[in-house]
Amino acid sequence: MNPTPPDSYTSDPAWADLLPLPQDDGQHPLAQIAYTEEYTEAMSYLRAIMAKNEHSPRVLQVTAHIIEMNPAHYTIWLYRAKTLLALSAAGEVWLGRELEFLNDLALRHQKNYQIWNHRQTIVEAVAAAAAPAEQGRLVREEKEFMNIMFEHDGKNYHVWSYRQWLVRRFGAWDGELSFVAALLERDVRNNSAWNHRFFVVFGGTDAQQGGGEEVIEGEIRFIEDAVFIAPQNASAWNYLRGVLKKAQRPLSSVESMCLGYAPLDDPDKITSSHALDLLADIYAEKREEHGKAVKALELLAAKFDPIRANYWNYRVGLIKAAA
Amino acid sequence: MSTPAPPTLQKPKHVKYWLRCLRTCLPTDYTSTDLNRLTLGFFCIAALDLLGSLHSETTEEDRAGWISWIYKNQLPTGGFRGSPAADLGEGDSGSEWDPPIVPASYFALVALVSLGDDLGRVKKRELLELLPKVQRKDGSFGEWLGGDGQFIGGSDMRFVYCAVAIRWILRGREGKGVVEGIEDIDVEGVIRFIRSAESYEHGISDKAFGEAHAGLTYCAIGALALLGRLHPTSDGLSTHANILRWLTSRQVPSQAQDELRDEEYVRHIANGTEQEIAAGAVITYGADGKPLWAGFNGRCNKKTDTCYSFWVCGSLDMMKKLHLIDFNSNRRFLLEKTQHFIGGFAKLPVPGTPPDILHSFMGLASLALMREEGLNRLDPTLCISMQAKERLVNMDWWRDAAV
């Protein structure tokens, strides 16, 4: 589908009808780049064919060629998508091949996000033409490919964003919770995986969404296990705050858990600054416990998280001002 | 034992670095930023402005030339393209494949203001009219408008910030309009979108249920500031207390292993002995009991990176809470771990990482917010020098509009 680019567009008969459009950088250009000759020539032909708004197979050739050199060329992706959809409607290309092209590209350009926007367009088009059973296979294959991406980088923002879109678009919630649990098993500090857990538990439609007492209890047990393994893991403590808020439970409902990691009367046994922080919030809510809140914050400033001493002292100031 | 040299901003080297970026071709590696040349150009201009060298080290003729070049990227129909690489020739300007780009238009305006231009040649009406057209129903903005009226580009806070900044620059502080009778954007929609993207961690993400991210948080807070909705009693964020915890938590002490290359790091974590892993996690403390070096990460449990020293400090500065971070260790992180000996800053504290334009600007910008000696002050909201902002708000057309 992406024929090999010619050695030279100028001497290729398939491109002979186009007059290349060279780049006019003008006088006094800013941020001029030392382009390769290959890029300069291909871009001249891209501009020429874009100006004609042509949607033909050779568009796939020149766009693939340039994307390889500059995957962040944003208009080229849309131009390619439009061409693909037109050719697909005419029965001239099979869109499944585009996904293979994107797989290879995404693995080599991990930081690029245009690839994932484009992927969304193509998957929508493939799904629109697919029978329900084929849709299931499409979603399965998409998830399998994302797993390969996560092997390289379990925190790739674009891939996680795409995953949320896919899950919601196709109602593909099944297996997401165990998938995320497996990732957290591998790295309990993977904040992206925690975030996805929050999406899976609270982000679905009513039918899939938990939020009931049983679900909340399950989440709290999951957090307790994770904190036990790594008490100083901020991801788990942030998730705990998120769950409590969703469940409309007071922070004080986890006071005893926090005291397990931050016994205020025995500072040598404190193993988590995040537990101290949470305790400070719990005690700040009741005037008669302000002394304990201040103590937690002072321990944070002096010993357990001195890099944020200014912030902890600021919180002490807020409590004193409220008194 | 000799006393180590105090950390210093190598100002002459930075000036040289930026002049080199302006006067010679950037290396081929920058090809992947070819469509964002106005962005790169802005960083070069704004960096020299922060260094106080824009007017001493470049000539009147240079600056006039760069101003003309930026205007050359303005489309006849209004708005700017990101690069001459997108120019399809006279007959097709402003066509489907050479559209005005929202971020490019923002960077063009701030670069022009930094260069001392009065924006007299900006097609203000056309650019302002573009903004409501690229706003989606959910309040977010596209990157540009496709030929058939569809919104193009990711839907995230970067475009929200750029659109709102263009509006502020051209409409004036009160939003009353440089030009009468132009449809405004849906401001309440913007607020709703930002609120929907505040995650359970209370940083801002790309959309509802996305992961909190410091760069996107900066964009959201900047947009709120420019809309006059950042005040603690305003409704732009859940509460300032929540966001402050998340923002200040981004500052993390440097560990020995932060200086490993990616592949070495992976090997170290997977195959290191217990002693090696313990050595990798070592933090160096100063006499005051605080870590000597502490930069910022962009998400929870990620590594520090020069650019987040700006995204986080800029956000806190807009909230009037920059004093809550630890200045000294951020300064030392930048000056001793990522400042490069040829000038500029590298992205990571990994020895051998070359400087690049984005991170070199962000390093300077973070230092400027902390009032580093020898640097001009930076306006955290527009991301230009205070002097440049003063020039903008004192332009006749701006003052009149703001009445």
Image (cartoon, rainbow, N blue to C red):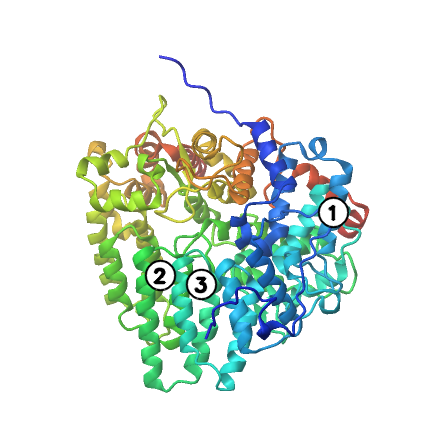
Q: Position of residue B163 (x, y in %)?
A: 63, 58
Quarter containing the N terminus of chain A: bottom left
Mark 3 element type: loop
Relative placement, left or right, of A242 versus B90 is: left
Residue A81 lies, with reference to residue B268, above or below; the image says below
Subunit under mark 3: B
Asked if the residues shown at circle 3 and circle 1 are in contact, with their CB atoms under 8 angstroms apart, the answer is no
Residue B342 lies, with reference to residue A71, above or below; the image says above
Mark 2 element type: helix
Quickly name the residue at label 1.
B67
Subunit under mark 2: A
Quickly name the residue at label 2.
A246
Residue type of the residue flagged with mark 1: Ile
Disc 3 packing (10 Å; few <14; some 14–19; many ≥20) = some
Alpha carbon distance from label 1 to label 2:
52 Å
Residue A56 lies, with reference to residue A245, above or below; the image says below
Which tag is nearer the camera, tag 1 or tag 2? 1
Residue type of the residue flagged with mark 3: Ala
